[in-house]
Every structure is written in C-alpha cells, then in structure tokens.
Image (cartoon, grey):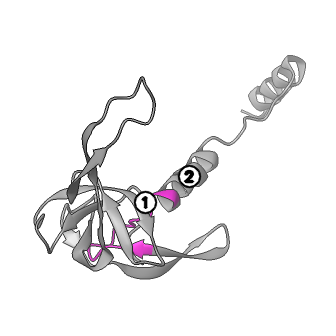
C-alpha cells in the first residue's frame, strides 16, 4: 500500500471525487483508508448513560486505497508513488518518491535534516586560556 498515515491525498473516484484530505487511518489488509472530511456517513447513536445525549453523528467512512492519490508537497500535484533506494548513514533505505523527485516519506525527511544539522554543529574544540594565549604568541612570532 503506497498511502501512509498523515499523507495528503486526492480522491479520484466515487461520490467525493476531487476532494482532498489527510489520511486519518489505514487498513492495509482490507486495502482501505479513512480520509478526513471524505465519505461522511450518518450514524444514529443511542444514549448509553443518563448523562449521554442521543442523536445523529457524522463520521468518516473508509474508502478503497485505489480511489486516492498522494499529493506531493513540492509540486502540489496528485502523483503515482514510485520507490527509490536512498543511502543514509551507510545504509540503503527504501523511500517513496514523486515524479518530480521529491521524497514523500516525512520520517526520512526528518532524519535527513537531523543528520545535516549534526554535521553543521560540530562541537568547538575547548582550550584553556593559558594555552590559547601561548598559541597566539607563537603565531605572532612566526609572522
């Protein structure tokens, strides 16, 4: 299944065709996803306790995964998902990729940013004042 939790998707078939939303839940065995604001169904709820109120509640129903397409963050288009192998920390990682080349996996993006941040923030070498003064004096003598 190429659709994951919290992906933005476009509905391409059914009564809600053209609507977009965020994936709330997935069911890989059944091949179905629940999208926020799509396939709203009315359910009659009976009051179970004296304090509860009975009424009609609208909630999202599951739709087939073949009826949705993932929306790319970079180009903003609905796209078929392709898979590519990317090297990270010396290991090959399989990620979902858009046709424009953007990586769709949010966890991979977070990890890649963290690695870049660590590389930029290399710890400074700690030196004592006395040795720093001695090194500065040695450099002045060389000049």
Mark 1 lies on a secondary structure that is loop
Res 32 quadrant in image: bottom left
Mark 2 lies on a secondary structure that is helix
Find out whether the residues at labels 2 and 1 contact each other: C-beta distance under 8 Å: no
Residue at 45% of width from left, 30% of height from top? 49
Vertically, is 139 above or below 128? Answer: below
Q: Which residue is mark 2?
A: 116
Residue 36: percent from the left, percent from the top? 28, 52
Q: Which residues are magenta?
A: 96-107
Residue at 23% of width from left, 75% of height from top? 67
Is the residue marked by circle 1 packed among few (<14), some (14-19), or many (20+) residues within 10 Å?
A: few
Q: Which residue is mark 1?
A: 5
Q: Residue furthest front?
A: 50
Res 26 quadrant in image: bottom left
Q: Is residue 65 left or right of residue 50?
A: left
Quarter of the picture containing the N terminus is: bottom left
Secondary structure mostly seen in the magenta stretch: loop
Q: Nearer the viewer, residue 93 or 60?
A: 60
Q: Earlier in the sequence, mark 2 or mark 1?
A: 1
Determine if the magenta segment contains residue 133.
Answer: no
Residue 43: percent from the left, percent from the top? 27, 50
Vertically, is 124 above or below 130? Answer: below
Residue at 33% of width from left, 61% of height from top? 34
Q: Nearer the viewer, residue 33 or 119?
A: 33
Residue at 46% of width from left, 75% of height from top? 28
């Amino acid at each position: 299944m190429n659709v994951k939790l919290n992906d933005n998707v476009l509905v391409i078939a059914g009564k809600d065709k053209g609507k977009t939303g965020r994936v709330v839940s997935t069911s890989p065995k059944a091949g179905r996803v629940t999208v926020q604001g799509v396939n709203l169904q009315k359910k009659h709820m009976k009051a179970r306790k004296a304090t509860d109120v009975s009424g009609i509640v609208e909630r999202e129903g599951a739709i087939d995964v073949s009826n949705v397409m993932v929306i790319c963050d970079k180009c903003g288009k609905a796209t078929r998902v392709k898979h590519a192998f990317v090297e990270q920390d010396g290991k090959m990682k399989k990620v979902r990729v858009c046709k424009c080349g953007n990586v769709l996996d949010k966890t991979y993006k977070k990890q890649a940013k963290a690695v870049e941040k660590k590389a930029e923030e290399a710890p400074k070498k700690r030196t004592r004042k006395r040795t720093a003064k001695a090194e500065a004096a040695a450099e002045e003598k060389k000049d």
